[in-house]
Structure formats: C-alpha cells, structure tokens
Image (cartoon, rainbow, N blue to C red):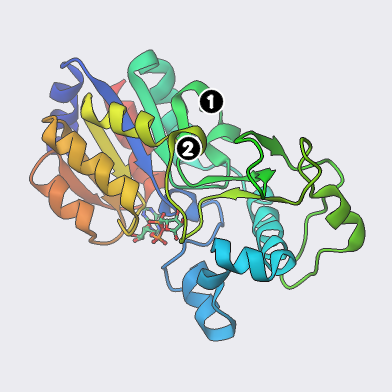
Amino acid sequence: MERIIAACKSALANDGYVIALTGAGVSAESGIPTFRGKEGYWTVGSREYHPQELATHAAFQQMPWDVWAWYLYRRTVCRRAEPNAAHEALVRWDRAVGDRFAVITQNVDGLHRRAGSPDARTFPIHGDIELMRCANDCVPDRWPLPEGVPLLEKGQAVDEATRALLVCPRCGGMARPHVLWFDESYDEARFFLDTSRRLASGAALLVVAGTSAQTNLPWQVVTLAARAGATIVDINVEENPFGEIAAQSGGAVRGSAAQVFPALVSALI
Ligand code: APR
C-alpha cells in the first residue's frame, strides 16, 4: 500500500484530473448485489430467469411491465442500502481536491450522490434507478420517479395505479427506467460519454474500484487515461483486467473498497 500511496502522491503533484471510476463492488458492502459475483444479479438470474435479457430495449418493447417490475424491485434494494465507507471517503477526497476531482460510476444505485458527492462532479454513465425518461425519447430529459411509485418486492407486479404514474410528463406516452441497456449505446446527453472521455484524456490519477471491466466506456476511460500518462490504481477483491493495467502503473490493491478507500484517501489528504 505504501508504494501505491507514494505513486498517488506524485501523480497528485501533476496537473490533471483526479478520477475515481467505480463499479458494483463499491456498493457490495452496502448490501447491493454485484452483477457477476456469486450472488450477482446476472449470476443468480441464470438459475431462475435471465435478467440480462430483461436489461434490454428489446425486452422493454415486448414486456414493459416485467422490465419495470424488475427495476422497481432493484430500486427497493438500493433504497434499503446506505452509503458505505468507500462512498464517504470519496466525498472527503472530492472536498479536498475540488474542481479537478470526478467520480465516474457504473452504479445506478445513487449511493455516491446520497453520500454527498456533488452532481457537478459525479457522472453515472449507466443511468440512475431513481430516474425515468420518455420511452419514445420525445425529449432527452429525465425525471425523478413520481412520489406514488411504490417500493416493489422481488417478483411483485406493477399494478394499474403505478402504471398510470409511469408516463412521460411531456408527451403523456409511456416512461421507461433511465438506465443503459445492453442493446443500447452511450451518448453525452444521457450517459456523459464525451465528459468521461474528456476527463480521462486529461487525467493525472485514475483510481478504478469494484469493477470486473466488462463494459465499454470504462475501458475507454482507462485506455485514454493510460495514454495521457495518468497513474492508474485498481482496488478490487479479485484479479481483473484493469488490475493488470494498474500493475504497470500505480499498482493494484486486493482488498475491499470500504477498507482500502478510507485508508488511501486519509493518506492523500
Ligand atoms: N470491494 C472491491 N471490489 C469488490 C467488492 C468489494 N467489497 N466486492 C466485489 N468486488 C469486485 C468483484 O471482484 C468484481 O470484479 O467488484 C466487481 C463487480 O463486478 P460486476 O458484478 O461485473 O459489476 P460491474 O463491473 O460494476 O458491472 C459493470 O455491467 O452489467 C452491467 O450495467 C451493469 O454497471 C454494470 C456493468
């Protein structure tokens, strides 16, 4: 850990952005399942049903209320979770570093925001489970889910009253969850594509945490940051492809995010 702290300190002496790129592993200790872990959403699903198929625009077109039921159940899991020491450490780091700090997160759970990470420097690149938008994309706007939308339990269906609430406030058409589905692409207006690339291309330090490196934009962020000469650190309980890249740079820590981030941030601020 000493070597990693030293590498981070010299990186922080350079100009450039200080970025935390987070994945489901950062929220695991808040009780939110990861996706590909032993009890992960995609893993468990394969025994009962294939939620990965649910996380597609195609599925939403065929069975919108099954898809909504699944996201409203996941929303319940997120609501019942609390930010952990990793989320809180990133808020402290944000306050210490200021404008050149950023959190780029794959998590739709909103825990960074609930911990106090400022919206201006927090970029949820896969959406937000508390937001909806027009299913016909009449406008790119997104809205908080209406007050009356209940917290659904697993397998609970969306009733008529709730269906009447899940409509686009602009055109009155159907609304959809504001999440990025597997058969959809990143853009700037909804998923901070250009912002993430710009930050990565100007990075001095990139700390990647709790991700298995299975999605596209995080790879672009790591690749662009490496190309920009940034110091890259990986925090994960397991080996992963970003760990190999970090090993050539700032180093990889095999430990839990809620234990490593507070120690790292305390050493740096
Ligand atoms: N601390 C640090 N890392 C952890 C912890 C922990 N407490 N617990 C698990 N991990 C690591 C796992 O070892 C794994 O590498 O977190 C990673 C979680 O990987 P995934 O479940 O694949 O989640 P993630 O990488 O965030 O998935 C990316 O894929 O399915 C889509 O849209 C979904 O945003 C998601 C994206």
Where, by quadrant of the figure, is residue 6 drawn? top left
Residue for point 15% across, 44% down = 251
Task: Decide: is 202 above or below 216.
Answer: above
Residue for point 39% across, 15% down = 98
Looking at the rendered structure, the secondary structure element under dot 1 is helix
The residue carrying mark 2 has its beta carbon less than 8 Å from ligand 1: no
Q: Position of residue 231 (x, y in %)?
A: 15, 33
Task: Decide: is 164 above or below 251.
Answer: below
Q: Which residue is mark 2?
A: 87
Viewer can see residue 39: no
Task: Decide: is 166 above or below 36.
Answer: above
Left or right: 176 as drawn, with respect to 29: right
Badge number at residue 119: 1
Looking at the rendered structure, the secondary structure element under dot 2 is helix
Mark 1: which amino acid? Asp
How many numbered discs, if any? 2
Q: Position of residue 35 (x, y in %)?
A: 46, 64
Mark 2 and mark 1 in contact (Cβ < 8 Å)?
A: no
Residue for point 53% across, 72% down = 53
Q: Nearer the viewer, residue 160 or 140?
A: 140
Viewer can see residue 255: yes
Task: Decide: is 92 above or below 114.
Answer: above
Where, by quadrant of the figure, is residue 188 drawn? top left
Quadrant for the N terminus in the image? top left
Left or right: 230 as drawn, with respect to 125: left
